[in-house]
Image (tube, rainbow, N blue to C red):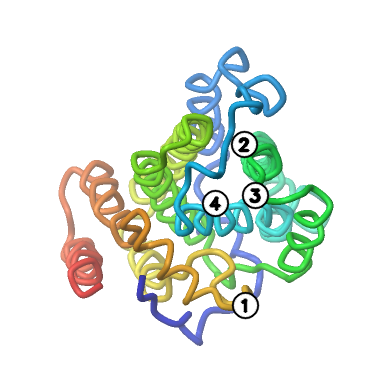
Amino acid sequence: MSEKPMPEHLSTERPSVGAEMIPAGDIAAAVDGFFAASPAARAWDVETGFDWARSDAGRLTEGQRSAVQFITYIEDHLPGYFDVYHQYFPVDDSVDAETFVHNRELYHFTVRWAAEEDTHARALARYQEASGMADRTTLRTDLAVEGRKPFDLPYRHPVQFFAYALVQEKATQIYYQQLRDVVADPVLGAVLTRLSRDEARHFTFMADVVSRYLRVHGDAVVEPIREVIEGFRMPLADTMRGYWRWALRIADVADYDHTAAYAHLVKVVDRAVDVRSDRLDELVGFIEQCRSLD
């Protein structure tokens, strides 16, 4: 799970507006596609989605219980993740009308995405409580320790927020699937199946948006995407105490490696453009090199 430090030249300014964004119509089309593939009738809820009375952490290994604790922390930091999109894609009078329209279309997705991610956090916390891993009061207090810490993605180009989320969502999906395949508690397995399916849909949205950036802006987004891969770190890597030791431990439990998601980014590039330029070829080569080195 080795990850490189964030490039120092990335700023904390809001993404540039106008030419660097894709048209609002493109964002709207991506959002429409996401909702069409995710009708409300297919939604699930924590209260009725699982037979919590059958959950039993005694069927898990110590490492598997540690993995559940770890991913609960990651999912529970949802307020910080959601705030990033509100901060960098505001829907208020701090932006011009054209940018507002773009951001408002995106907001339709981020609200739905946030609700689903918050459901993930609640489901994992409920599993810990129902299975005997933790009592609710103690768990709330423990989650607050990390939850109060700030989260940011110090990018300057709008495509970078989607490229980062593309990798993060796919990496998380893969890990949930692999953890599900090794745990013996069927209730936890069912929870992880639900989570992995949601992450797959979130990845598809991010991949769609990145593809649209590539089709609209081509070579102009090569360097911003390269910067994301060059400095990629999973959420909370810089704030959670003992993150790297814990991350290495859960990697042993279910063979986690975030760079497995890089192959999917390469596929996005391949599908987005009919003829790759030299710069796009260099980007693909760089991504593949990062995967092989890690």
Residue that mark 3 sits on: 133
Q: Residues within 10 Å of mark 1 (few under 14, many from 20)?
A: few
Where residue 50 sits, quadrant-wise, is: top right
Residue that mark 1 sits on: 241
The amino acid pointed to by label 3 is Met
Q: Position of residue 211 (x, y in %)?
A: 36, 45
N-terminal label among 2 and 3? 2
Q: Position of residue 20 (x, y in %)?
A: 50, 59
Residue 68's label in the rendered image is 4
N-terminal label among 3 and 1? 3
N-terminal label among 3 and 4? 4
Contact, mark 2 vs mark 3 (Cβ under 8 Å): no
Q: Position of residue 79 (x, y in %)?
A: 74, 54
N-terminal label among 2 and 4? 4
The amino acid pointed to by label 2 is Phe
Contact, mark 2 vs mark 4 (Cβ under 8 Å): no
